[in-house]
Image (cartoon, helix red, strand yellow):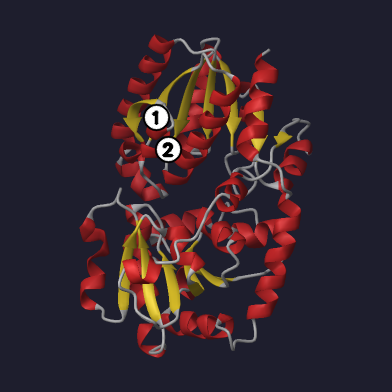
Amino acid sequence: MKYYIIAGERSGDLHAANLVKSLREIDTSREVRGIGGDYMKDSGVEVFMHYRDLAVMGFWEVLKSVAKLRRLLKLCQKDLMAFKPDVLILVDFAGFNLRMATFGKANGIRTYYYISPKIWAWNQKRVFKIKKVVDRMFVILPFEKHFYQRYNYEVDYVGNPLLDAIDAFQPNEQFNDKNNIGINPVIAVLPGSRKQEVAYILETMLSVIQYFPDYRFVVAAVDNLPPEVYAVLDKTEQVSMVYNQTYDLLAHAHAAIVTSGTATLETALLNVPQVVCYKTSNFTYHIAKHFIKVGYISLVNLIAGEEVVKELIQNEFTTTNLKIAIREILPEGNKRQHILTGYQKVRELLGTQSASQTTARLILAHLA
């Protein structure tokens, strides 16, 4: 079989790579090409374009990059047609991938989607487009199956791929020594993997350091961003930075400050109490808040169906509010046990099946 896979960001790159590994176990003659990053490349994918070229977020940011994205879309479509795959597999990244789904369907290419776009959060009418252009959808959040059922669209719940990654994770006991973190307890800082996220969020995340002199703040950095993105750390003592060691950092942390996104669920599955933060441009925020259809922004709260972790969004994301929220989740805080109990509920709702293996089997079964 020939597979063309598109992942437009770091987390999608990881999950796509694990899916490819599972496909490799049951389809030894496979050929895989597509758009992704280093994880996909290491799994044996012939990466045509790196996802960093597509990394744009926010309404205003997208508007400024329309010409670039249109050009990249044309390049991808040309490459897809030259490769002539048996199936096009799209991983999250709705803005780009739904356009590719439309193109694939129009050209007679079987189109599958792994990790649904978050259409349940806003612009729910996109479900009608998905029904037209996506032949099979594999979802990773339990409530997504019920969402699609409301529109008479049957999807497969395959479990959550983060469970695979975290269950396979083995903490490095030498993490603190390796990174010169010292003996103070750690508060992990996860500012995200996109340049715009870090620019809007990191400085406020670190503004509370003075109120927690007994703790060491450690920033989870990623190497796909330029070093200057983390320049604010140069002005700050009592803080360290580690690259590409997020799971090890969380495994050694007493609490975490996390940008809304996949990392909130990773933090929960590693059982670290957290405060969830999010901020973007005022233009993007005011547009988005008119369309958002859900009561929470963090995956933890969305899966649980209640507020398990505190969310500080836009104007609520201030130094004062963040300081109060962190104090509540530290070992002596009054919200810590509530969070840990909520995490257990989230794990039970997610189930135990391997998402990548389940999806790989279903892909082959549907193709057959």
Work out whether residue 139 or residue 98 is closer to the camera in this orientation and state it: 139
**Can you name the residue that lies furthest to the front here?**
174
In the rendered image, which residue does mark 2 sit on?
Answer: 8
The residue lying at 57 percent from left, 53 percent from top is: 166
Work out whether residue 62 or residue 36 is closer to the camera in this orientation and state it: 36
With respect to residue 296, does 118 lie above or below? above
Secondary element under disc 2, as helix, strand or loop, is loop
Residue 125 rendering spot, x and y as whole percentages: 64, 37
Q: What residue type is labelled 2?
A: Gly
Horizontal placement of 39 versus 366: left or right? left
Q: Is residue 205 visible?
A: yes
Residue 350 rendering spot, x and y as whole percentages: 71, 51
The residue lying at 30 percent from left, 26 percent from top is: 71
Mark 1 neighbour class, 10 Å CA radius: few under 14, some 14 to 19, many 20 or more? many
Q: Which amino acid does label 1 sit on?
A: Ile
In the rendered image, which residue does mark 1 sit on?
Answer: 35
Alpha carbon distance from label 1 to label 2: 7 Å
The residue lying at 65 percent from left, 43 percent from top is: 140
First in residue order: circle 1 vs circle 2: 2
With respect to residue 365, does 205 lie above or below? below
Q: Quick one: quadrant of the C terminus? A: top right
Location of residue 306 by image quarter: bottom right
